[in-house]
Structures are given as structure tokens and as C-alpha cells.
Amino acid sequence: MTACASVSARPTQAADRFVVVDGTRLRFRDEGRGPAVLLVHGWTLDLEMWNPQVTALRDTFRLIRLDRRGHGLSGGLPAPQLDGEDLAALCRHLGLARVAVLGMSQGARAVLGFAATRPEQVAAVILDGPPPLDGEADTDLPLERYVALVRAHGIDAFRHEWARGALMQLRTQHAEAHSLLAAMIARYPGNDLRCPPSPAGGIGVDSITAPTLILSGAHDLASRRHAARQLAARLTDAELVVVPGAGHLPNLDRPDVYSTFCRAFLTRHCPRATY
């Protein structure tokens, strides 16, 4: 398998759509046919991070991805505590009774919160590089320092530093993957660094019984790999898979491998006949 053959910095052909949730306008895209899968991006990123997975999987699955509040082209302030409710509102808007969910990094919190509060609606869960989830401080994100940097020097100074941080380092040399990542960071409004939200609380992961796949980049930070192992041990029905040759962004580092893992898991747990 080639390492990055399907990555593209260009948008896919699906048109941007919008849903208004409690007065906040959220961008989403909806493409493909088959069992519905919600894809939720991480901090400072947006729905276009999933371009390679949409290209690889839309022949078999209906892929619905949104810009979380305050990210990409969505309005409002980032509010991780509201992400689960936004996913529920998007499901209502589209008439989706049952879905699979895929969340990356901070987006893993969103899908776990959604799965914990609406277990009857969730067929399967995929978590990619999850952070600590029990109210522990995420030491990989020195938010106070970033807030001070924005106040002193502006959002571009933050973007410059963040793009060079450990979590945003791609191991692939594929130019289009780097272009896609750079474009997302450049779109990040940074409103949560100007007006920091309340800290996210813990999530009752012990109540989640849906089959879960946890993906961990082989070269992700040690703290993230540790969090992935802890979560796999706690969940009722979980499997942990390491993506070789990948850091914190395995869907861009090794998109073909990543999409193959997702396809196999979703095919087992989201058969087309049930949708």
C-alpha cells in the first residue's frame, strides 16, 4: 500500500452545507451511500482533514463530517462540552436514527460524549489519538501559554508555533498532505484562545458498550499512546490498533492503511442490511 496516495489538499466535490444549532451556524458535508458515519476532527483542524477517508470509503459508507463550533467555517466559540449536542442536532437534521462515529484527538471527546448519552443511536465507535478523558489535564496542550502568545502577538504567532509543535508533525513527505494540514491551521480562527472556554469535564466511558476501535499512531506522543491503551482496557468491547509509520495524524501520514482499518471495522459492525 502506498503511504499517501489518496491525500489531497483540494476540497472533495461535495458542497458545503450548514445547520443552525442554538443560533450557531455549523458547516458540514454529506457524501457517499450506505451506513452513516459521523467524522469529527481535532483541535485547530476542520472537516477537510477527512478528505482522504471520504475518497476511500464513500463507495460503501455515507460519510458526514462537520466543522466543530469555532473551527473551519463554523461560527461560534469552540465549546467541547457542546460537541455531543451538536452531533445529536446534526443527526436530527438529517433524520439519522443510528450512526457510527469517528473522532480524532479532541474530537474523540465529542464522539465519546455522544455515545455515552445516546447509546441506542451509536452502532460503533472509532477513536483516533484520544487525549486523557477523566478530567486530567492535557499536558500536550499548554493552553495558558498559547493564550498569552495570542494576546501578545496575535493569532498568526500561535499558528506559526502550533504548526511546528509535536502534535502537528507529519511523518509523510507527501507534499499534498502538508498543504492540506497547513491550510486547515491557517483557517483556524483561534477564538477559544481569545476567550478560553470552561475546561471539559470527564466522560463516563464505562457506560459505553458499542464496539470500539482505537487507532494510535506508532510515533504519536507517549502520553497519547498511553491514553489509548488505558481506554482500550476500560471499554467493554474495544480493540487497539497501531498505525505504523504515523504520528498524531495517522489519517494523513498513512491514509490507505488508516482507511483500510476503518473499512474493515465498520463493515463488521455496520452491515448495510441494517440501514
Image (cartoon, rainbow, N blue to C red):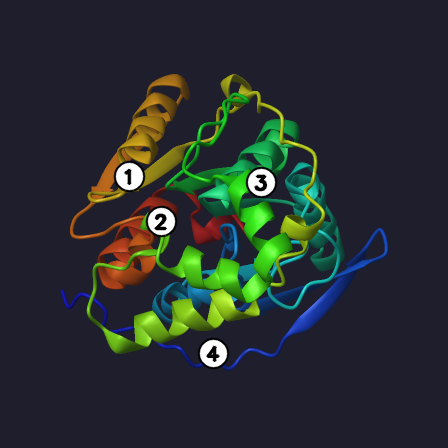
In the picture of the structure, the residue carrying the numbered disc 1 is 221
* First in residue order: circle 2 vs circle 3: 3
Could you say where residue 106 lies in the image, as x and y percent from the top left?
50, 42
> Residue at position x 40%, y 60% from top?
163
Amino acid bearing label 1: Leu
* First in residue order: circle 2 vs circle 1: 2
Contact, mark 2 vs mark 4 (Cβ under 8 Å): no
In the picture of the structure, the residue carrying the numbered disc 2 is 167
Q: Secondary structure at mark 4?
A: loop
Q: Secondary structure at mark 1?
A: loop
Figure label count: 4
In the picture of the structure, the residue carrying the numbered disc 3 is 110
Quadrant of the snapshot with the N terminus = bottom left
Q: Secondary structure at mark 2?
A: helix
Could you say where residue 218 lies in the image, as x and y percent from the top left?
20, 43
Q: Is residue 24 visible?
A: yes
* First in residue order: circle 4 vs circle 3: 4
Q: Residue furthest front?
A: 152
Amino acid bearing label 4: Thr
**Left or right relative to 252: residue 174:** left
Amino acid bearing label 2: Leu
Q: Is residue 32 visible?
A: no
Q: CA distance from mark 2 to mark 4?
A: 25 Å
> Residue at position x 52%, y 43% from top?
145
In the picture of the structure, the residue carrying the numbered disc 4 is 12
Mark 4 is surrounded, within 10 Å at the Cα level, by few (under 14), some (14 to 19) or many (20 or more) other residues, namely some
Contact, mark 1 vs mark 4 (Cβ under 8 Å): no
> Residue at position x 56%, y 69% from top?
187
Q: CA distance from mark 1 to mark 3?
A: 21 Å
Could you say where residue 111 lies in the image, as x and y percent from the top left?
55, 40
